Amino acid sequence: MSHDLGRVTYVTNAKTVMRMLQDDPTKYFQFRIENEGGTGDVRITDGAKLTLYARAPFGVVGQSPVVVESVTDTQFTFRTREGHFDGPNALISFRTFEEGGKVYLEQSAWAPQGAPINAFFAKSNIGHMGWPEQAANLRAAIMSVDPFFQTQPIR
């Protein structure tokens, strides 16, 4: 699922947007994130062990442990750990890219051991309801720091 974050500008591009997300994920994700053990600033770095307090449908909140891997200038992946509602070793990836003069955020997931109820949520698209919120949070932050956002594409 990809979300249009706006035009590429002199300040905003796929790398700068991903840096924002990696440096302060708690500001942009639609759920609470903590370091394993609950201490320190949360940053997306290779090997970081995090706990996601994800909102599930019907208001349920669960602790979902992940480890961060495959961090680059424009992407990273959460690998789920034992105790995550998708089961261990599911992959949830986040990528920024540029196309047609715009910056996009893409989220994708692969969960071969997910609980049967998760298959229902995936097919009905309920599980994706929160991802537009993450994109909206990034878009709002970009608009607050980039005076050229939405108005001056790089030529």
Image (cartoon, grey):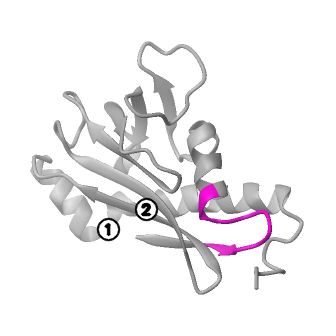
User: Is residue 79 found left or right of 13 in the rendered image?
Assistant: left
User: Is residue 125 found left or right of 144 in the rendered image?
Assistant: left
Q: Foreground: 37 or 55?
A: 37
Q: Residue furthest front?
A: 155
Q: Residue at x 86, y 71 (%)?
A: 148
Whole-percent x, y for residue 39 in the image: 54, 13
Picture quarter with the C terminus: bottom right
Q: CA distance from mark 2 to mark 1?
A: 7 Å
When asked about the image quadrant of residue 154, the answer is bottom right
Q: Which residue is mark 2?
A: 129
Question: Is residue 3 covered in magenta?
Answer: no
Whole-percent x, y for residue 101 in the image: 65, 83
Q: Are marks 2 and 1 in contact (CB under 8 Å)?
A: yes
- For the residue marked with disc 2, what is the amino acid? Met
Disc 2 element: loop
Span colored in magenta: 5-15
Whole-percent x, y for residue 80 in the image: 26, 37
Q: Which residue is mark 1?
A: 125
Q: Residues within 10 Å of mark 1 (few under 14, many from 20)?
A: few
- For the residue marked with disc 1, what is the amino acid? Asn
